Image (tube, rainbow, N blue to C red):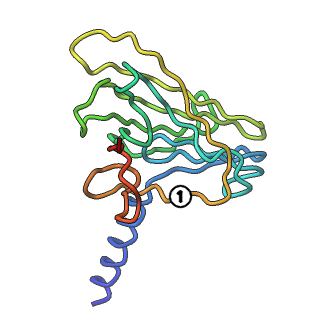
Amino acid sequence: MKLSQSCSLWCCLFSLRTWRSRRSRGTGTMGFQLGTYGRIRLDVPVYPGTRQLDRMSFVVALSPTAVFDYTEDSENLEPPSLTTGGIADTTATVLTDNSFSNLEPNVRVRVTVYSWHNDGFVIAKYTIINTHTGAYTLPWGRSLFPNRATPTVGRRCPTTRRRRCRTSSEPDRTHTSA
């Protein structure tokens, strides 16, 4: 009986850990968190601390209407991982893409965060991989959102797979009246 209870508890904890898949670490003077869909957060003095940067995420555009971004397109391919040693004291990485939507641009983005003990900075490296059959010329950049007083929950809407579901009380902004 004790074996089955401990197995059930371990499975429950493993599921919770997988669902909240994000990696946090600090340098001693600041902390960072790398989230499942490639979001980077920065806190001072360590994580969790006073949030300085709520979200830094990657954006790549094929056209004004075909944009890969955190809010609409980013889907997890590999969960965030954390390693120590190597070229940095701590390295966190995650791989995302937008394959679930079948929308262009077809890219994979690997986000890697490097940190060193007692330094007041981290380095974020973005590796863009074209998964389309043709060549792209893509402008890219980062979205930066400083700390805000009331952060939103980053769960996906089960029907549209968007970050936020529209409630029935909100107006439909896709149609304009004449």
**Residue 160 or 56: which is nearer the viewer?**
160
Is 165 left or right of 49, judged from the image as shown? left
Q: Residue furthest front?
A: 178
**Can you say whether 101 is above or below 167 in the image?**
above
Is 21 left or right of 40, judged from the image as shown? left
**Can you say whether 81 is above or below 171 in the image?**
above
**Residue 143 or 174: which is nearer the viewer?**
174
Question: Who's the residue at 68% across and 49% down the image?
Answer: 147
Q: Which quadrant of the figure contains the C terminus?
A: top left
Question: Who's the residue at 71% across and 47% down the image?
Answer: 52
Q: Position of residue 115 (x, y in %)?
A: 65, 36
Q: Which residue is disc 1 drawn over?
A: 152
Q: Which quadrant of the figure contains the N terminus?
A: bottom left
Q: Position of residue 113 (x, y in %)?
A: 57, 35
Question: Who's the residue at 48% across and 20% down the image?
Answer: 140
**Can you say whether 21 is above or below 125 in the image?**
below
Q: Quadrant of residue 104?
A: top left
Question: Who's the residue at 36% across and 57% down the image?
Answer: 165
Q: Position of residue 55 (x, y in %)?
A: 58, 43
Q: Residue furthest bottom?
A: 1
Q: Which amino acid lies under the numbered mark 1 shown in the image of this protein?
A: Thr
Q: Check disc 1 and report its element: helix, strand or loop.
A: loop
| Number of residue marks | 1
Is 164 left or right of 40, judged from the image as shown? left
Is 157 left or right of 148, judged from the image as shown? left
Q: Quadrant of residue 171?
A: bottom left
**Residue 122 or 156: which is nearer the viewer?**
156
**Can you say whether 94 is above or below 140 in the image?**
below
Q: Quadrant of residue 150?
A: bottom right
Mark 1 Cα shell of 10 Å, populated few (<14), some (14-19), many (≥20): few
Q: Position of residue 31 (x, y in %)?
A: 68, 48
